[in-house]
Amino acid sequence: MKTFPRVAALLLAVGAATIQGEAIAQDAAGVASRWIVSAEPERAYGWLEGEPDSEFSDVVGVVWGPNESIAVADRTLATIAVLAVDGRVMATMGRAGDGPGEFRRLAGIVASGEGRVVAFDREHQRLSEWTFDGSLLEDTRLSRTGAARRVGEVGRFADGTWYAREGDRMVAADPGGVGRDTVGFHRLDQDGAVGAALARVPGSLSSQFVVEGMSGMRGALFSPRALSAVRGNCLLLAAGDEPVVRIFDQTGTPRGELRLDIPVDRVTEGHRERWVAASVAAAGRAMGGEVVPEAARMIEVMGEAVGMAARVPFANDLMVDEPGYIWIQSWRLPGGPGSPEWRVFTETGRGIGAVRLPEGLRVLHISAEALTAVRTDELGRQFVQVHALERRDTLAMLPVPPGCG
């Protein structure tokens, strides 16, 4: 069938889609339920007239700089733009290429702690450190002393030490079955050496399928993901289908776990049917209208052949805000950056309510008084927005977990 490659690509594009369980437990009304995120942003960056370097389409990270400037990393542009409060581009870092400070697959940026920006390129497996005026200080290529698995992203602890997270990968699976990856977090030395493992967490699922004699491997339906966040000198790690957050310090020593009061439902054939229907609708939107019948049928056939996860993921993302509260974003159907509902927990795992965000925001950072996120418009243009976060109760600064200070 001639439509197979096109339809297969569309199906792969929405393959990580999940559906919330039939019964969603509601958090008891609490402190967080009275926190309000402003519907309109206080500030927005991107697509400023006369500033082509601010035309973002694939933002992978932001870092705040001096005088309320902001560095925005865009994977498609292979550039980091430094913008002033009024949106003007003050400086740019990098470009597409293989030379010093150039990018092939910009994966993200991290504040170095000295008023500088460290960028990680996944293709080059390289760190680049910059000043906010756009000056390149040095490049550091990562090296592995153990397994050769590539690094997917990097992060920094409060004491200035670094860690590296392995990239996700497909794993072998029998036809119709599923196999599960695990993701390792490793110590990252200043010379770029990826050292001993700090911790491992269950990752995504792979499923092998055969349709009309053609085989393929892709993420299983309702595949969870590995979730991570930093709090002080600790990593908070979770798998998206098990509501348990495990805590490890920067040496890899376990520091406890938090069992969150979030239900996890079993995946049923009803979920598969809803996933197929959502995928057909997504394919229609991608094709600029209603999907043709033969393409819809191919999606249905592939959807029936692909293995499924055992449980519906409970979370799309995990973050820790500056005061120390743990935010868990709920899953949703494909077609957006995640559910607008976030459940909030204390450092001990006690649920204190839910916060509902404006639709269509992909959150990057949460401070005491504001939330920084990316919004994509109907033309595919991306804007970095800052929304006010009003906490209508006395805000407590939570202590870091034991061993994380």
Image: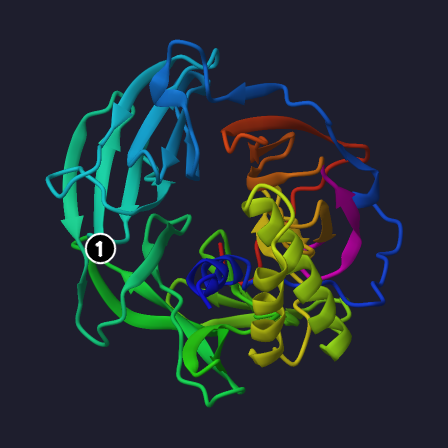
- Number of marks: 1
State left or right for residue 77 relative to residue 269: left
Image vertical order of residue 365 relative to residue 190, above or below: above
Quadrant for residue 113, please give it. Answer: top left
Residue 268 visible? The answer is no
Q: Which residue is farthest bottom? A: 174
Residue topped by disc 1: 125
Residue 82 position, x and y percent, is 35, 23
Does the magenta-highlighted stretch encompass residue 350? yes
Report crowding for label 1: few under 14, some 14 to 19, many 20 or more residues within 10 A (C-alpha).
Answer: many
Taking depth in this image into account, of 138 and 41 the one nearest to the observer is: 41
What residue appears at the point 57 percent right and 61 percent down from the top-left corner? 295
Residue 363 visible? The answer is yes
Taking depth in this image into account, of 12 and 370 the one nearest to the observer is: 12
Taking depth in this image into account, of 9 and 5 the one nearest to the observer is: 5
State left or right for residue 333 relative to residue 21: left
Image vertical order of residue 333 relative to residue 265, above or below: above
What residue appears at the point 37 percent right and 42 percent down from the top-left corner? 110
Q: Which residue is farthest left? A: 99
Quadrant for residue 395, please give it. Answer: top right
Residue 104 position, x and y percent, is 23, 45
Task: Magenta stretch: give its range.
Answer: 345-357
Residue 85 position, x and y percent, is 47, 14
What residue appears at the point 54 percent right and 64 percent down from the top-left corner? 15
What residue appears at the point 27 percent right and 24 percent down from the top-left corner? 92
Does the magenta-highlighted stretch encompass residue 29? no
Secondary structure at numbered mark 1: loop
Residue 20 position, x and y percent, is 74, 63
